[in-house]
Amino acid sequence: MAWQPRAYRPAEDGIDPDVVPQVRLESGSRMPGIGLGTFGSDHAAPGEVAEAVLGAAEVGYRHFDCAMVYGNEPEIGQALRAVVAGGIEREALWVTGKLWNDKHAADDVIPACRQSLADLGIGYFDLYLIHWPFPNHHDPGVDVHSRAANARPYIHEAYMRTWRQLERLVELGLVRHIGTSNTTIPKLELLLRDARISPAANEMELHPHFQQPELFDYVRAHGMVPIAYSPLGSPNRPERDRTPEDTVDIEDPVVMRIAAAHGVHPAVVCVKWAVQRGQVPIPMSTRRRNYLANLRAVTQDPLTPEEMAAMAGLDRNCRLIKGQVFLWREGQDWRDLWDLDGIIAS
Ligand SMILES: NC(=O)c1ccc[n+]([C@@H]2O[C@H](COP(=O)([O-])OP(=O)(O)OC[C@H]3O[C@@H](n4cnc5c(N)ncnc54)[C@H](OP(=O)(O)O)[C@@H]3O)[C@@H](O)[C@H]2O)c1
């Protein structure tokens, strides 16, 4: 049976949203400095994720990271409706949405955004991102060796046609800010050159073992907020998304030592580090104890400067979400997606 929302009830042991750090955007808007991820992948059904959204709002979350491809926007919409019916104004929420790869064509962008808004039961997105810079669709759950028949490299002119439609969404009042995800410095250079409305944020993989210092600095220097996905190192991602060389942030001895010193789970240390470093983490959890701990983490008992320095030394350049399914030619390596030599691969 479809998930049925309960009535929204603020939690007595929750966190006052006003004490949660906020990040100021170039527009002057304020984004809550931590959000709840909503990608259930193989382990959390849409109803479970929606229940987490409702529960997270009850404990004080006001920022939710959504995407059409997560396949749970109708259920999350039920939860958001319950939150608003419970007295939380829409304006107090921050909802991010993402355009999936099979909706890059100019005619598809606005209908796709409208569909997500209708499913989520909201009139506008605070932030709308192009999920990946490639239009290469793949079905959820496919093997990493799967390739779309029409897969192709990044083509800047095509990306700009999509971006123009995102700009149009702003003009239509359906979206307040637009941004990028999974992009690189060479691609951002072109976008910043050609955009009429500049990206307000870039959503990127960021966790202690993958700190992306160059891109992180670039994003901030160009007026974008770095939103940190998989901020705990995505410990429950499916087997197909793992490779033997992947490392585990929450088992890092330094993270574990700092966690013990603070009396918290190592995941909580990753969250504290993220916010103190200046990125906006969007950890996913369907367990109340965990999402509450992650929110509380950013309001009390910060890491010391020495601990922050120790965390900075943990980078292992370990990308977990490699994006193999976006490759467009046989024999390519996933590194070809990430423009490591500063040149956009064609
Ligand atoms: N833009 C993109 O392309 C992109 C890509 C990937 C992800 N994302 C976004 O980023 C979000 C987060 O990434 P992610 O889900 O890959 O990984 P993540 O947030 O790094 O890790 C999530 C896992 O950590 C566990 N966890 C959470 N808090 C915990 C705590 N305090 N103690 C112990 N375990 C804890 C959760 O398990 P329990 O549920 O059992 O607590 C969950 O399975 C996604 O949900 C999605 O919204 C975006």
Image: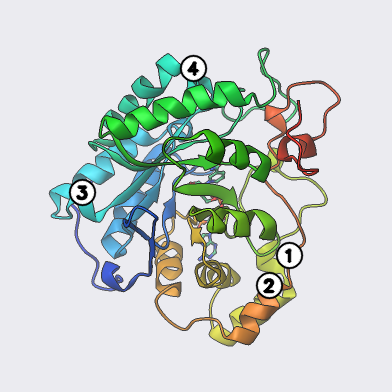
For marks 4 and 2, the one nearer the N-term is 4
For marks 3 and 4, the one nearer the N-term is 3
For marks 3 and 2, the one nearer the N-term is 3
Q: Position of residue 343 (x, y in %)?
A: 76, 37
Whether residue 322 is visible, yes or no, is yes
- At mark 4, the secondary structure is loop
Q: Residue tagged by mark 2?
A: 312
Q: Nearer the viewer, residue 339 or 51?
A: 339
Please tell me which residue is depicted at 62% across the width and 78% down the height of the picture. Answer: 308
Do the residues bearing badges 3 and 2 touch, measured as CB atoms within 8 Å?
A: no
Do the residues bearing badges 2 and 1 touch, measured as CB atoms within 8 Å?
A: yes
How was this image coloured? Answer: rainbow
Q: How far, Cα to Cα, is label 3 from label 4?
A: 30 Å
For marks 1 and 3, the one nearer the N-term is 3
Q: Residue tagged by mark 4?
A: 105
Q: Nearer the viewer, residue 32 or 148?
A: 32
Do the residues bearing badges 3 and 4 touch, measured as CB atoms within 8 Å?
A: no
Q: Residue tagged by mark 1?
A: 315
Whether residue 74 is visible, yes or no, is no
* Circle 4 Cα neighbour tier, 10 Å, few/some/many (<14 / 14–19 / ≥20): some
